[in-house]
Every structure is written in C-alpha cells, then in structure tokens.
Amino acid sequence: MTTESAAAAVQATVYGYPRQGRNRELKKAIEGYWKGRVSAEALRDTARDLRGANWRQLAEAGIHEVPTGDFSYYDHVLDTTVMVGAVPARHREAVAADPLDGYFAMARGTQDVAPLEMTKWFDTNYHYLVPELGPDTAFTADSAKQVAELTEALSHGHTARPVLVGPVTYLLLAKPAPGVADDFEPLTLLDRLLPVYARVLADLRAAGAAWVQLDEPALVQDRTPAELNAATRAYRELGALTERPKLLVASYFDRLGEALPVLAKAPVEGLALDFTDRAAANLADLAAVGGLPGKRLVAGVVNGRNIWINDYQKSLTTLGTLLGLADRVDVAASSSLLHVPLDADVERDIDPQIRRWLAFARQKTAEITTLARGLAQGTGAIGAELAANRADLASRAASPITHDPAVRARTGAITESDGRRSRPYPERAAAQRAHLGLPLLPTTTIGSFPQTDELRVARADLRAGRIDTAGYEERIKDEIREVLSFQEKTGIDVLVHGEPERNDMVQYFAEQLTGYLATQHGWVQSYGTRYVRPPVLAGDISRPDPMTVRWTTYAQAQTSRPVKGMLTGPVTMLAWSFVRDDQPLGETARQVGLALRDEVNDLEAAGTSVIQVDEPALRETLPLRADGHAGYLAWATESFRLTTSGVRPETQIHTHMCYAEFGDIVQAIDDLDADVISLEAARSHMQVARELAEHGYPREAGPGVWDIHSPRIPSAREAADLLRKGLEAIPAERLWVNPDCGLKTRGWAETRASLEHLVAAAREIRAELPSS
C-alpha cells in the first residue's frame, strides 16, 4: 500500500475508557449491592447503561473502533481470572453458588475466606487482583462476559474490538498459590493456558469480532530469554489458529525493547505501541527491525496517563514517520484512558485559561480524532485546531505559575548535608527509646481512621455554607477526641489523630501548596470502588503556611501518649498527582521535599516526637526497566531525606508503604534512613519481612497484620500468627505491630474489633518473649 493510501485508511481508536460514569454511578451501584440496597439486576442495568454511554460518547467523538471487555465491576485482571477458570479453590464454592457474589468475594474476601492479593498495575496507582496459580491449576474457558459485551456494542451499531489481558502478561502477573512452592513459575503453565485463549478467540469471532486486542504490557519490562521465547511460542500458536479474529497485540507504559522483534515477526495482524516520551525509543527500534510490512500499527501518541494537552505538531511528525513503517497506521492514546478523569470541561473552578491546558478522557478522544484527520487529510484539514493548540502550549510555557524564582533558588542551593540526619541510626534509636519509653512490639496505626458519613456531611455542609468554619472545626475536634479515646482504651502505644479534617492524603496537602490545582470531578479508579481525585501539579511548589501543625498539636494536648504527625512524602505527592511534564521529575521532587521539610521542622518545634512521612508510591514509580532504576531511586530517596533530615536525633521518623512488590527496592528503603517503616504484609503472608531480613535491614519495621482492604475482621489468633512469622525475620526489639494501611475506607465496627484483636495479639506475643 502506498503512503497516500495508508494515510487515507487512518482510523482513531482507544484501548479502554473510564468505567465509573460521570457521577460515579458504578461505585454507588456496587456499594449499594454490597449493602443489600441494590439488586443484582439493577447493578447489571447500571453497568449496561454505562457501557452504552461510553461507546456512544466515543463514537460521537469520531472514534472508529470502540473497545469492549475493558469494563469491569472491580478489576480487569480478576475478570481474566474468571475468563480462564483460574478461581482459587477457597472461592470455588462461592463462585458456583452465585458468580457475582463469588467474584466480589475473590476481590474483597469474606469473614471466613481471604481475598486475592492486591498490588499495583505496573507503575500506575491502579491496583489489580493477583492471580494465584500452581502446578495443579486447570484452566477452562468462560467467554460469557467478553461475548456479551461485544454483542451489546455490535447491537448499537458500533465497530467494536474486544480487549483481553494477553496470556503472557497474565502469567507473568500471577504468583504461586498458597501452599505452592515460592519458586514455582506460573509461566510454565503457558501451554495449558493457550487452548483456553484459543477457545475465547473462537467464541469472539463467532460473535462478530473482526479484531481482538491482546494486551501484553509485561513485555515492556526487562525479560529473560525464556520469557521472550514464551512470547514467541504464544503468538506463533495463537497466530496459527484458523478459527480466530485478527489479532492486535498491544504494549504500553514503556518501550518494547528486545520484545519488539519477537512481536514484529509473530504471525499476528497488528501491533499497538506507545510513542509518548517515556517510550520514544519505540520509533527508532521499529525502524531498526524493518517496520511492520503488511501489518496494522496502532500508534499511541496521545498520553493516556497524564492530563496535559497533546502537542499536535510533535505527534503529527511522529505519525508521518510511522506511515512508512507499516501497512496501516491508526491513532490512539498510549494506554487505556482508565488512568485519567472523564471530562475537563466540567472543572468550572479552574481558571478557563489553565483548563485549556488540560485533556481528560473526553478531550483525549477529541485529540485522537483530530490527529487521525490531520494524518489522513493533511494539516490543512485541521488548521484551526493546530493554531489553537500552539496558542495553548505557549500560554502554559509562559505562565508565572510554572516558574517561581524563589523556589528555584532554594532548590539550587541544596547541599549534600541537607539530606543527612545529624546522628547515625544506632545513636538515634537509643535517644528515641529513652525519650518515648515504648514497650517491645509497640502498637500503632498508619494514620487515618474511618471517614464516617457524619464527617462527609459536615464537609459538604461547610462547602455549601450550611455551617460556618467554627461549627465545622468543633465537629473535627469531637472526632479527634473520640479517636484518641478509643486508642487509649484499646491500649495502642503511639496514637494518631485520625485525620478527620483530610479529604485525601495527597489532595489535602496539594490544596495548601502553591503550584498545585485541585479538581472537583477528576475521579480516577484506584481499586474496586475506591476512586481518588489526583491533584494537578502545574507549577513550582512552596508551602506558604503550616498545614498539619494545628490539628496535630491539638491532638497531642489531649493525651500523654505520643501522637504521630502525619505527612505524605514527596514521591507519593508526585505519583498520585498528575505531574508536570515540562521539567525533570527529580527537580519537582526536590521542590516538594523542601516544602515538606518546613512542615516537619514546624511539627517538631511544636512538640511532636514521632513524625510519619508516607511513601507508598516509592515502588510503584520505579521505572519498568532496570536501566532507569538508579537515576530514579537517587532523586526519590534524596527527596525523602530532604524532607526528614532536619530534626533532632530523639525525633522518630516513620515512613509507610503498601500494596507493591518491595523486594527489589529494599536497598532504597534502607537509603531513606527512616527510623521505622510500616509495610503491607498481611495478604502476602509476611513476605516483606523476609525480604528485609535477607537484606539485613538494620532499623525498625512494622509488617502489617491486618489487611484493611478487606471487610473481614482478623482474629487475635490470626494476628498473633502473623506476628510470629514476623519475628522469624525481625527481632522483637525492632518489630512494630500495625495494620497494613490507613483505615479511612473501613467502618467503625470492624475498626474497633480489628484493632482490639491487634493489641491483644501484641500482648500475647510479648508474654511469650524471654525479655518480657
């Protein structure tokens, strides 16, 4: 096909779309179902309406081929587990009795049965449910969901492309099931899994699918020769099937690297590649392998993970180069739009000029269709759009929001000593033990307590003017006193004030720092029905006034026990925001670190002896390829130390991390030089404690003994058993007792019972220790 005819065939598409609806209708329906207020039929009706609305919006925007199968009640990897029949043995009875309830039991657990482990989807803040596999796993095909959603889309007159998690990525994301040896490799099940995918593909073809997309983002990571050989075999076998649709293998989040020749040579009809800045090497790599003659290339030139407008001219230049490298080039976002909010136009509280710099999912679909039209018809066909785009990009670059000389002077003056504590850890530990007087196995929580309906109503009443600031603050004081009283009665050693005044662990701080913008409707799925509103990091960062000192000191005045000051660390402030893309991340992290340093120092000056700086995103932000690790970890750990190194030796610095794979960043955890770290460990059965021990981690640690992302209440015996496992790796004088994470999403009844069991477990184990 000539370049001209290839351009004429250009189409616009996306890999996935936000699931929640304009007003988070899906969240409300699912949570209503869990509480018995919404029937299963009503839940399914809501889901069907949302899918239909999504497809209609995409088609009206000019998207030629809409995705199906990307919609999920909880998680698309869990949906894949159902599709391939890999339901864990402990959940099979529930799934057989009621597939919907069984599905949610796998995601959330029940009082008697633990859920699947949950961790981050590559380097995003989306969480997936980890498949549990073993040598005895028997896969069976269940294509009902995929076929039904394809049929729905086709019935509405859409051209539709089902999207599946690819077989190689599915196995690489899996872990050995409980009771299976840790060295079991789920990828050894590939030959058993491929016939199931073949069956699903055949069912989709019979239902009318012309194309099916198989997502293989795991192939953008460093892969061994054996893993690359598995990918070769997988797509050789799937490509050789006769009863199948055309196959589009998709990768995103980074460059394919050594996996690109594997997929380029595979007998599939198309590849989807990321061509945004983080994966720019795909362009040269694709040329180096001779392009994709005779194949379809879906070019991800619109960033599917961030919210800044596209640079049309830059994207068109990339697309023009690609026209000579494939038989057909289509235009897409770099990944599913699941990772961005739905619509920037509804953000009426943001200055209209600044709002023009933003592109949420609906704006990105317009960008995709504009680029497709420009590629197919020439730049003259989109002249007005190009001119407006240039003006918006220039407006952002010239804005005083993006450049504060005082902030830049301060970061330029940073010295090496600014990132070091004044005394080594052993001296600090002795000073802290003398100052705090804590028992062995001290108990604490991670920070937040349940955000009750009453708190949310009070916050809404304040915004609406139904109560004044004084009335709202009295409500906050009442809540703090209640939280402190409960902790004291329960016997917790290091208290927290519960954070009733905070809306979100990032947004709360972003609203008080210069350079950040807050959205009102920018909801993004984090996991299940948990949605967050990531703030927009638009310019240089500083802290005009103290942010947490008032409420922390108020809480400390109510009790003689130490109350932790609670902050969100610089890496997490970046990772859980939509970060600026016009300067290196390390520079932004230094700015945030210095702003938080001022807060840490003010907390200490106000009498706070324990200060926790949470960094749950340290692992999730780790680059997907090893050649980027050292540079990232250098600025990430430096920014944390900038935040925390200005305090006295007797002030105890904590940090917290959760729901990620920590084994490959233990050295970085060590480099943070925090006195205490608390970590998620309950679902992974204390794996992280073993990893810390293998590293020789020398400081104090609290591997969690309560999985707070499940509604089940762990017994005191269960918590004690986990503590005994922890003690196998961490000596008693360095082991803390705490939940996995904050308690904001839990109810008070389960919080009370679970923390009482946690304290009882700590007392039981203390009594068993010789030194007690």
Image (cartoon, rainbow, N blue to C red):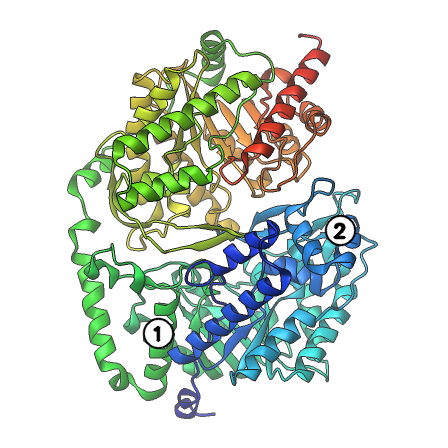
For the point 59% across and 69% down, the residue is 69
How packed mark 2 is, by other alpha carbons closer than 10 Å (few <14, some 14-19, many 20 or more), is some
Residue 92 higher or lower than 232, as above or below: above
How packed mark 1 is, by other alpha carbons closer than 10 Å (few <14, some 14-19, many 20 or more), is some
For the point 51% across and 70% down, the residue is 49
Q: Earlier in the sequence, mark 2 or mark 1?
A: 2
In which quadrant of the rendered view does residue 747 lie?
Answer: top right
In which quadrant of the rendered view does residue 109 lie?
Answer: top right
- Amino acid type of the residue that numbered disc 2 sits on in the rendered structure: His
- Residue tagged 1: 366
User: What separation in Å lies between label 2 and label 1 (alpha carbons)?
Assistant: 43 Å
- Amino acid type of the residue that numbered disc 1 sits on in the rendered structure: Ala
Residue 293 higher or lower than 590, as above or below: below
Q: Is residue 289 visible?
A: no
Residue 255 higher or lower than 645, as above or below: below
For the point 36% across and 34% down, the residue is 501
* Front-lying residue, 647 or 289: 647
**Could you tell whether 324 is left or right of 354 in the image?**
right
